[in-house]
Image (cartoon, coloured by chain):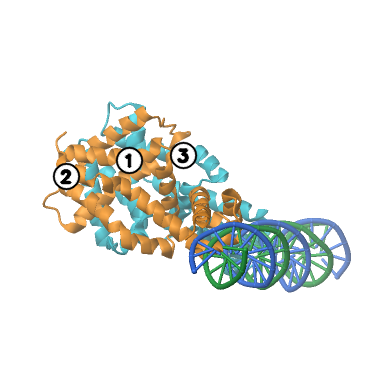
Chain colours: A cyan, B orange, C green, D blue
Amino acid sequence: MTRPSEITRERILKAAERLFAERGYDGTSIRAIVARARVNQAAINYHFDGKEGLYREVLRAAFRGLTADQLAHAGDAAGLPREDALAAFIRRQLRPLSARDEASRHLRIFNWETVRPTPVFRKLLGEEAAPFMGLTTDLVRRFLPQADQRTLLVAAIWLIGQCSVFVRNREQLAGPPVALALDDAAVEWLAQLLSRWTLQGLGAAV
Amino acid sequence: MTRPSEITRERILKAAERLFAERGYDGTSIRAIVARARVNQAAINYHFDGKEGLYREVLRAAFRGLTADQLAHAGDAAGLPREDALAAFIRRQLRPLSARDEASRHLRIFNWETVRPTPVFRKLLGEEAAPFMGLTTDLVRRFLPQADQRTLLVAAIWLIGQCSVFVRNREQLAGPPVALALDDAAVEWLAQLLSRWTLQGLGAAV
DNA sequence: TACGTTTTCAAACGTAGGTTTGAAAACGTA
DNA sequence: TACGTTTTCAAACCTACGTTTGAAAACGTA
């Protein structure tokens, strides 16, 4: 692998990630990607063997990026009181609300897949979802020590869902009729509210 | 309005609803719709003034259909103890989990819009979301009588989110690694679990 | 039945999409 | 430097899309 060709590859990946996140797979054209990346149109077929191959790469990177971010703090959680660990988890889950950064983009690519998962995505999920689900399950287990596995899984999904409804619908919630402010203070307020309700929901005193 | 032309209209709407639900707006072609509806291709432009006009009609029907279910029971809720009203709300929200019917299809059309809302959808939401949000807000207000409007709104969204994470990701949750069973018994069990956690979360004794 | 309107139809139009092509350029190495 | 390989490039190709067209058919009504 020579250096310049790697640059082209990276430029394509970066542009593709942005556009796929914004417009989804179908809504993003090869021509739009190459225009943004400032490379030749044929480069995508040369480097990634077509649009689908490029998407596969982007998806994998997004998935890794997301889980890596969350798994990086898994170690901390064990050392915290369960209440604090839960609050930290929720705060991290809400992070894309205020930050319009890489994590936010990754999550968006992810979201496109939840409506109609591509085979590529299904495969990825089957292979790599376990660590994150395990982390979340471990967290709720601290509140439901004698629950069975099925209940723990549902609790984990429940917890994730409480956060993701705000993250996913960020744009609608920002406008009328809800008009939820989304500055840092509001996000922190929201995180505390969700923490309290979740703690109580799982039967912990607050 | 003559009779046969109404039949054509209905056939198009029915076919379009199915296809838009399955593949989304971009993923559904006019040609696929007319093939399923067994009508001429130009009929869509004649009756709906183009693909976007057709989508507008389908979206409106989906929205009405979805909220109608909850709104129809809004009257009942007032007469129930708040705990029962909440449980009934959750059970209704989870209904698309077990029923692969019209409601399920409507929700799916809705879901396509959450990633990147079309202007058509935004307009619809602005015009018609208020009754459903009002209903949900009224419900949570019974648990948080002295909360301000912003908190009530967040609580309402929180409640909706807890249900929608299961409904939205039904397909992924049914498969590995979660492998959540989704027969009627399991859905009822899930509804009760969510009811309990939500009740506790909102500070009610169970 | 006769006539103006509404509705259907097959065909074509123009555009945008992903991919392919074959040659030119850049590159690494002997 | 010379040469085989890798990478870039502009152009073309082919397909699928949404829409338009103009005439034929069906319709409602007088």
Residue at (35%, 58%) from the top-left corner? Answer: A170
Residue at (62%, 52%) from the top-left corner? Answer: A52
Mark 1 neighbour density, 10 Å: few (under 14) some (14–19) many (20 or more): many
Mark 3 neighbour density, 10 Å: few (under 14) some (14–19) many (20 or more): some
Residue at (30%, 57%) from the top-left corner? Answer: B129
Q: Is residue B77 above or below residue B114?
A: above
Which quadrant, please, contains the C terminus of chain B? top left
Secondary element at image label 1? helix
Q: Chain of mark 3?
A: B
Q: Chain of mark 2?
A: B
Name which residue type carries label 1.
Trp
Residue A158 is tagged as: 1
Name which residue type carries label 2.
Ala
Check contact, mark 2 vs mark 1: CB within 8 A.
no
D14 horizontally vs A148: left or right: right
Q: Is residue B17 above or below residue B127?
A: above
User: Which residue is label 2 attached to?
Assistant: B78
**Residue farthest left in this picture:** B146
* Rendering coords of residue A116 (x, y %): 50, 47
Do callouts 2 and 1 point to residues on the same chain?
Answer: no
Residue C23 falls in image quadrant: bottom right
* Rendering coords of residue B125 (x, y %): 34, 60
User: Which residue is label 3 attached to?
Assistant: B171
Secondary element at image label 2? helix
Decide which of C6, C30 is in the foreground and name it.
C6
B106 horizontally vs A27: left or right: left
C-alpha span from label 1 to label 3 = 16 Å
Q: Is residue A202 visible?
A: no
